[in-house]
Amino acid sequence: LSKLQGSRERIPPASSELRLADLRQAGTTSSARGLSHPRAMRCSALIACAYALEATLAQELTTFRFVFTEVSNPTRAAGIALAELRLKDSNGTPIKPRATGNPGGNPVAGEDVSKLFDLQPDTKWLDLNFATNSRSIVELAVNTTTTIASYDLLTARGSQRKRDPRAWHIDVQTVCGEWVELANHTVLSAPSASLMWYTQNEQGFKFPTVLPSGAPDEPCPPLPPAQPPLSPPPSPPPPCLPLPPELPPPPLSPPRPPPIVPSPAPPPRPPSPPSPPMRPPPPPMPPALPLADRYRLVFTSTRDPQFSGIQLSELIFYGAAAEKLAFSSASSGRDDEETGQEAALLIDGNVATKWFESFVASATVEVQLDTPSRLVRYDFITANDVPGRDPASWSLYSVLSDETTLLLHSITGFAETLERQSSYGGFYITSPPPYLPPSPAPPPFPPLPSPPPSPPSLPFPPFSPPSPPVAPFGHRYQIIIDEVRADRDEGVAVDGVALSEVLFFNISDEPIKIISATNVNRNGQNDQEGAANLIDGLYTTKWFDGSLATTGTSTLIFELEEAAPVYRYDFVTPRQQKRDPVSWRFGLALDGDGFYEINRVVGVDPPTGAASRRQRYNPDNTGFYVYTPSPLPPPPPL
């Protein structure tokens, strides 16, 4: 190696770093000096050896992950948070991982996953994607020789405990890249205060130390066969020749011009090798979901079997552009549907009516669309009473033209408790099944004569903006606020929520007149700070509700002169920053206490500073869109 580097200094003995960079640099430098020299072949071997050693070092880490699946208050929590995830060895000494990660997470600036292992209780990790993904993953890698004996969790600083984890499982990654569960843990209740350890003792939770049987030794699944080469493989290099003896340097003498020798004739070019075989064609792309006008729902269980019967208020289908699909009929296959609660009431657009029938083992509902359509998403609306009759397991099929059925989506054991006359949340049909038969290819077109040259094309006119998707609308809208700025600021007490104004706008950016505003179960001592101040047109007045500090939510209902769609809305800040809403739900207020959620806003950063008070949340006068508008498509090339 010293000769290859052109130096007589000896390289120090290999350490844990193995001096891989020196090894690669030495081989690369010597190769550049003369590729025809036999040493160049040895240089290539050195470079390959260096990369192989690096791959070996990468296998000296063991990767674990904590998968958190439940928090203390999932209905209010906009994320999950912890101050510390403390790993310890058998002597109780903290272990710091070599690498950490939060795949699929959405951390706040300064509150990333590294804060779990910095041994600083005043910092915290916050993942706002827990509400969306229904879980949050923390990955960590330690040396293979490191043994984790125990671990413990420390709650984050703050006045509310809604983001504390209650359930999680620990997995290990095998040498084949697969995850294997080692332990599953659920606590009855998280600690009741901030900066408190879960176990409240020195031992902590015992960390699983036994790997699954056969995980390190079983062979990995074979890789798929490689593609055939595009060209014949190169001939193997000739064997390395022994290095010639070093010759003494020649005596210095004046250089002489080399003799002129006529260039030899070039050797004849060898014949071209035969063309390689053509690459096999790629497999065909999976076809899109078929157009259909008949769909069938087969319900197989309800939430509570002790209540006889099954019921729903509404069934909603959405197409590829988020538009509602129009139904022409609905039937349940019963002999007599003239009961006042027949299946046709599922598609009447009225949540006050419902479909109900007796339920033993299954119930079937078949719907017919006005025109054949491609179903992308569907949703249920619960009935007005008896949550035990809500469907819990079902399958959705499309009925093809030959009366065969195609399974599109299936749910088993839907266990989330829903309010009455509210949405199930919607279900997407993400991709077609792999066994969908391909559509027949169209016949080839006959060849056409060559057309005459066309005149230069004129530029295309500008595109008009696409129409926004239509959201459900009515004359009464509801906003449920569940988090304010004080929830996120350290050391600030939550005493309520406040706003100066609430503004609604239509698609033409014109204000929508609100005739009344109501604060459900308001908790406030000053009657002059009621919900009517939100629609008086004055930024100097305010609305205040202290019920957020006691119940966790604050609910507002706004009534319009007539039913109209709300395209966007905006808030006006109050005088005190700590009462600014940062997370809420927006939707329709249904009869009784029903609520139909249209969209949810989580983790907003309201404007700050003295100049931001009694000003709109969005200084550019845009607001919060009920549906986020899509960007315009690029114009086609001229």
Image (spheres, grey):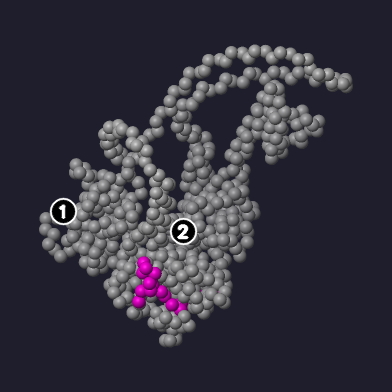
Quadrant showing the N terminus: top right
Residue annotated with mark 2: 130
Q: Residue at x 30, y 45 (%)?
A: 289
Q: Residues within 10 Å of mark 1 (few under 14, many from 20)?
A: few
The amino acid type of the residue labelled 1 equals Gly
Main SS category, magenta section: loop
In the displayed structure, 170 sits above or below 190; it is above
- In the rendered structure, does residue 192 fall within the stretch colored magenta? no
Q: Is residue 189 visible?
A: no
Camera-nearest residue between 592 and 206: 592
Describe residue 349's horizontal placement relative to residue 113 as left or right. left
Q: Position of residue 440 (x, y in %)?
A: 27, 36
Q: Residue at x 56, y 58 (%)?
A: 112
Label 1 element class: loop
Q: Quadrant of residue 241?
A: top right
Q: Position of residue 212 (x, y in %)?
A: 49, 42
Camera-nearest residue between 231 and 583: 231
- In the rendered structure, does residue 494 fall within the stretch colored magenta? yes
The amino acid type of the residue labelled 2 equals Phe
In the displayed structure, 113 sits above or below 145; it is below
Q: Residue at x 52, y 77 (%)?
A: 613
Q: Position of residue 116 (x, y in %)?
A: 58, 58
In the displayed structure, 429 sits above or below 275; it is below
Q: Which residues are magenta?
A: 492-513
